[in-house]
Image (tube, rainbow, N blue to C red):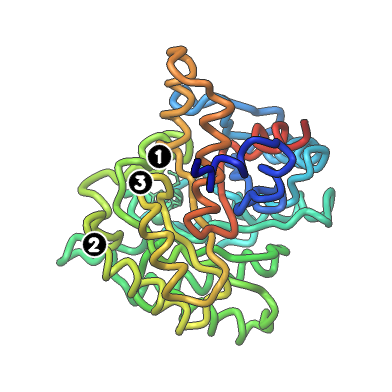
């Protein structure tokens, strides 16, 4: 009888020997949301287990992360005041600059990545400075501000910058700004292929960053476009990105594979808020085996071509991996 495939699946040790794709705690980056105050740890209803935290709580959280073997975080800020340009993001006393300094002084071995964008800091909630005529983000003025924001993060001690605004020429402008400021060794992980996705809904509750009018379709990508998705990441590779990204992840596994095949840089994927919220809701409804579905989702990202996974599940995944 034919038993070409099944004879390799009978023994569990052989199954492990033949496993093609692997997941490790070293693949994970954990997102953190910083706000001012002390002793603040507020859960967001749409994302159970995800908190807005004051800086002291974030420093404590980093100790927990280390015990789980997680050494990389990506920071998002909720400023006290917002204005038309997002000044808090370009100020050395802004929420992110303070958070970086606090983490790096308490936990120097922690690898601190910063999300570089303006939507959390502008009163209109868009990802840059508005052009009053076009009623959308002015690309080139925003590029100058992104370079300023990058330098603020760099000077505060960030280990990697992750621009997420989808402005044209963003990679090149930030790289030049960092190089001129003396930060030639600071890597950039570009949100190179980022779609205008409804899966970001819960994030905007946590980060308080919903646009006050319109949407982000004049700068983020149309979910229907494959060729453009590849071209966006190829452009950022050419402009000097160190790591590329596809975001969201779960509904875009084909794009992850395409970008992996057409570029030669490490690839991150962002397992976004809506993907996380869906698993949590399904678990609460008792309709899935949460832990197994979560691990299967993580391995799917790796199999599709991801090298790095940014995920709100990071702590839970690390716990499973430790078993
Ligand atoms: C900021 C940013 C967003 C996310 C990461 N960086 C929101 C957006 O583009 O609206 C989404 C992350 C998530 O949904 O988990 N530009
Ligand atoms: Zn933004």
Residue under the point 59% across and 60% down: 307
User: In this image, 49 relative to 220: left or right?
Assistant: right
* Quarter location, residue 254: bottom left
Q: Residues within 10 Å of mark 3 (few under 14, many from 20)?
A: some
Question: Residue 251's mark?
Answer: 3
Instruction: Find residue 52 and name its label.
Output: none
Question: Which residue position is annotated with label 2?
Answer: 225
Front-most of 147 and 192?
Answer: 192
Determine whether the residue tagged by mark 2 lies in a helix, strand or loop.
loop
**Judging from the image, what secondary structure is the residue with disc 3 in?**
helix
Q: Where does residue 129 sit, x and y in percent of width and height?
A: 34, 64
Decide if residue 66 is on the left or right side of residue 166: right
- C-alpha separation, residue under disc 1 versus residue under disc 2: 24 Å
Crowding near the residue tagged with mark 1, few <14, some 14–19, many ≥20 C-alpha atoms within 10 Å: some
Disc 1 residue: CB within 8 Å of ligand 1: yes
Task: Judge from the rendering whether residue 55 lies leftward or rightward of residue 191; answer left or right.
Answer: right
**Where residue 25 appears, x then y in whole percent?**
71, 47
Judged from the image, the secondary structure of the residue bearing numbered disc 1 is: helix
Q: Earlier in the sequence, mark 3 or mark 1?
A: 1
Residue 204 badge: 1
Q: Alpha carbon of mark 2 to alpha carbon of mark 3: how far?
A: 13 Å
* Residue lying at 45% horizontally and 84% vertically, measured from the top left: 238
Looking at the figure, which quarter contains the C terminus? Answer: top right
Is residue 279 at all visible to an observer of this figure? Answer: yes
Q: CA distance from mark 3 to mark 1?
A: 19 Å
């Amino acid at each position: 009888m034919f038993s070409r495939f099944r004879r390799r699946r009978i023994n569990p040790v052989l199954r492990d020997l033949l496993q093609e794709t692997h997941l490790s705690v070293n693949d994970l980056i954990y997102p953190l949301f910083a706000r001012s105050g002390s002793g603040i740890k507020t859960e967001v209803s749409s994302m159970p287990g995800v908190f807005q935290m004051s800086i002291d709580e974030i420093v404590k959280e980093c100790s927990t992360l280390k015990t789980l073997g997680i050494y990389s975080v990506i920071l998002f800020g909720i400023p006290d005041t917002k204005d038309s340009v997002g000044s808090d993001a370009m100020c050395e006393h802004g929420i992110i600059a303070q958070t970086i300094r606090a983490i790096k002084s308490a936990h120097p071995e922690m690898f601190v990545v910063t999300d570089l964008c303006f939507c959390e800091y502008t009163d209109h909630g868009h990802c840059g400075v508005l052009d009053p005529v076009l009623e959308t983000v002015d690309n080139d003025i925003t590029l100058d501000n992104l370079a300023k924001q990058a330098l603020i993060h760099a000077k505060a001690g960030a280990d990697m910058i992750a621009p997420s605004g989808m402005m044209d020429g963003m990679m090149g402008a930030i790289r030049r700004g960092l190089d001129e400021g003396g930060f030639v060794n600071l890597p950039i992980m570009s949100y190179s292929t980022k779609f205008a996705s409804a899966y970001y809904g819960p994030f905007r509750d946590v980060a308080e960053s919903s646009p006050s009018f319109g949407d982000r379709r004049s700068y983020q990508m149309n979910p229907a476009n494959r060729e453009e998705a590849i071209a966006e990441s190829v452009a950022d590779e050419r402009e000097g990105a160190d790591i590329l990204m596809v975001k969201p992840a779960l509904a875009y596994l084909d794009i992850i594979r395409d970008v992996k095949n057409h570029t030669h840089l490490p690839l991150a994927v962002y397992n976004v808020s809506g993907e996380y919220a869906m698993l949590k809701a399904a678990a609460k409804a008792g309709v899935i085996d949460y832990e197994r579905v979560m691990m299967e989702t993580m391995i799917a990202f790796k199999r599709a071509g991801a090298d790095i996974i940014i995920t709100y599940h990071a702590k839970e995944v690390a716990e499973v991996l430790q078993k």
